[in-house]
Image: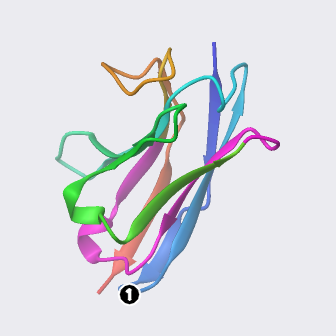
C-alpha cells in the first residue's frame, strides 16, 4: 500500500505562494493517478487538483489558474504549486493516490496532511 508524506505547508500572506510536496513510497507516481485534497475547519474534504497517468489534470474551479499539480518521476513525488493564495485557501491539504491511473472514485490512500494558513 502506498505511503504518502506531505510537506511544504505554512503561514503565508494573501497573494503569496507555497509549494506542497508529497513523497510517495510503495507505489509509483507514474502508475497511479495522484491528487491533492483539502479540508477546512467545519467543511468537507474537497478535491483541489488531480493528475492521471496520461497527464490529464483537473482542478477545483476556485483554484484554476492559481494552482498547478505536477510530478517528478525520478523523485516519485507529487507537487502542488499554489500562487495568489487567498484566505479561503486555508485548510489542511492531503495528498491522495488512486488505485489505477485514472481519477475515478475515491482515492486508495491519504497522507497525514499539511496545514496551509493564508492571512489577510
Question: Residue at label 1?
Answer: 15
Q: Percent x, y for residue 1?
A: 63, 12
* Above or below for 14 versus 71: below
Q: Is residue 41 left or right of residue 117?
A: left
Q: Dividing the image into 4 quarters, which one contains the C terminus?
A: bottom left
Please count the marks in the image.
1
Q: Is residue 103 visible?
A: yes
Pick the residue in front: 64 or 12: 64
The quadrant in which residue 119 appears is bottom left
Q: Give the extent of the magenta segment.
A: 73-94
The answer to whether any part of residue 36 appears in the image is no
Q: Secondary structure at mark 1?
A: loop
Front in this rendered view, residue 26 or 101: 101
Residue occupying the point 34% across, 70% down: 65
Q: Which residue lies at the image location 23% right of the left edge and 69% below the top edge?
A: 88
Q: Residues within 10 Å of mark 1 (few under 14, many from 20)?
A: some
Q: Please give the name of the residue rendered at 63% of the width and 23% of the height, measured from the top-left corner.
A: 31
Rendering quarter of residue 83: bottom left
Q: Is residue 52 above or below residue 17?
A: above
Asked if the stretch drawn in magenta spans residue 92, the answer is: yes
Check residue 78 for magenta coloring. Answer: yes
The residue positioned 17% from the left and 46% from the top of the image is: 43
- Residue 48 placed where, x, y %? 33, 49
Q: Determine whether, in the image, residue 41 is placed left or right of residue 99.
A: left
Residue 92: % across, % down:
40, 51
Position above or below: 120 against 96 = below
Amino acid at each position: 500500500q502506498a505511503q504518502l508524506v506531505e510537506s511544504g505547508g505554512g503561514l503565508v500572506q494573501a497573494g503569496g505562494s507555497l509549494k506542497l510536496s508529497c513523497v510517495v513510497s510503495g507505489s509509483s507516481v507514474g502508475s497511479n493517478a495522484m491528487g491533492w485534497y483539502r479540508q477546512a475547519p467545519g467543511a468537507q474534504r474537497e478535491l483541489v487538483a488531480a493528475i492521471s497517468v496520461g497527464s490529464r489534470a483537473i482542478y477545483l474551479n476556485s483554484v484554476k489558474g492559481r494552482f498547478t499539480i505536477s510530478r517528478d518521476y525520478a523523485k516519485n513525488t507529487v507537487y502542488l504549486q499554489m500562487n495568489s493564495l487567498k484566505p479561503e485557501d486555508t485548510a489542511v491539504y492531503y495528498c491522495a493516490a488512486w488505485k489505477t491511473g485514472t481519477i475515478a472514485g475515491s482515492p486508495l490512500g491519504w497522507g497525514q496532511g499539511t496545514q496551509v494558513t493564508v492571512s489577510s
